[in-house]
Image: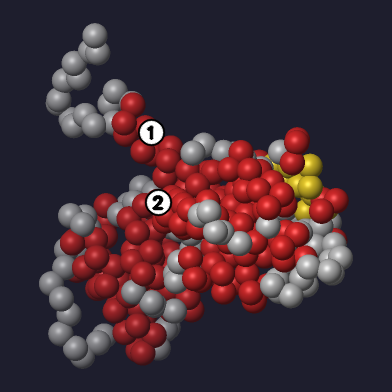
Amino acid sequence: MSGASSPIVNNPEAIRDYLTYLRVEKGLRPLTCEAYERDLLQLAEFLEQKGGNLLRAQQTDLAGFLQHLQAHQVEMRSRARKLSCLRGFYRWLLLDKTIAHDPTENLESPSGWKVLPKSLAESEVTAMLEQANQAARHPEAGGAALRDAAMLELLYGGGIRVSELVGLRVEDLSLEQGQILVRGKGDKERVVPLGRAAVEAVEKYLRLGRAELQRKRRAPEIFLSARGTALTRQSVWQLVKRSNAQASPHMLRHSCATHMVEHGADLRTVQTLLGHADIATTQVYTHLALGRLKAVHREHHPRSQQRTGQAVEPRP
């Protein structure tokens, strides 16, 4: 047992009995038992702050604990070790018939967690695009301003990669059909639909801006530098940073996917749009769909806000 003073928690006897079991029956070393004690006391303290305790913990409580650790920069290896401790503890409680259900049964290991890529809020993206389009609408706007607005609209509107953007050629455009042909990783081609805003921005750039940048060169790429050559990925990255210091081209791609899921798009559609070979890559956005589902449920289900014993008035 640890020599340090332990916080006062509910169910201390459960922790004490489990540590005795580990020492006597499992033969674990004292330092290992001390580490397990710290983990269980940490969980107990977390649960009590939420109004719960060790013996009433549900899977959502333990998932919240692990997310709390992650939010406080606890390394994945440490989180995995703590989860291993919790699994052993709750299995022991189940075998001892102290609890009726093991809350760690279907809890995913931190090693399998996927971190959702960072995305911008819709208002932030709107501000970026409005700023770029306003510059492109200026009477003295040059080819670069028209180009920049079109590129930002494509990065967000089509969710394409920066490498796909700089590689786009004139023959890849089907603007009348509102779509473009994109060559992704491994030279795999996919058709990406575009919204009206992106189509209009690209059309305006082709009509009024590209010839100015092209000069006497005949580069096949759509988006050109001031020298008439194809843009580099670094130059696009710098453009996005000038529009929003916190953003990147990849963040606009993830913002596209995030906002689509939040507005009800299914993952298969998002997978096709982004060009993910495996649906598992797209499943990092699953929790967004779940969050939206929960919000809709809370808003519309007649019993979602009801407390025990509280009558629900019928809607007129």
- Can I make out residue 143 in this image? yes
The residue that appears at 43% across and 37% down in the rendered structure is 293
- Say which of 76 and 313 sits in front: 313
Q: Quadrant of the N terminus?
A: bottom left
Q: Position of residue 234 (x, y in %)?
A: 64, 76
Residue 206 spot, x, y in % from top left: 72, 52
The residue where tag 1 is placed is 296
Q: Which amino acid does the dot numbered 2 rest on?
A: Ser
As helix, strand or loop, the secondary structure at mark 1 comes to: helix
The residue drawn where x is 38% and y is 77% is 73
The quarter of the image holding the C terminus is top left
Question: Residue farthest to the top?
Answer: 316
**Residue situated in front as seen by the camera: 140 or 166:** 140
Estimate the x, y position of residue 77 in percent, counting from the top left.
48, 79
Mark 1 neighbour class, 10 Å CA radius: few under 14, some 14 to 19, many 20 or more: few
Is 6 positioned to the left or the right of 272 in the image? left
Residue 11 to residue 300: above or below? below
Q: Residue at x 13, y 72 (%)?
A: 8
What amino acid is at disc 1? Answer: Val
> Earlier along the polypeptide chain: callout 1 or callout 2?
2
> What's the coloring here?
secondary structure
Q: Mark 1 to mark 2: distance in Å?
A: 21 Å
Q: Which mark is residue 123?
A: 2
Q: Which mark is residue 112?
A: none
Task: Give the x, y percent position of residue 102.
Answer: 41, 53
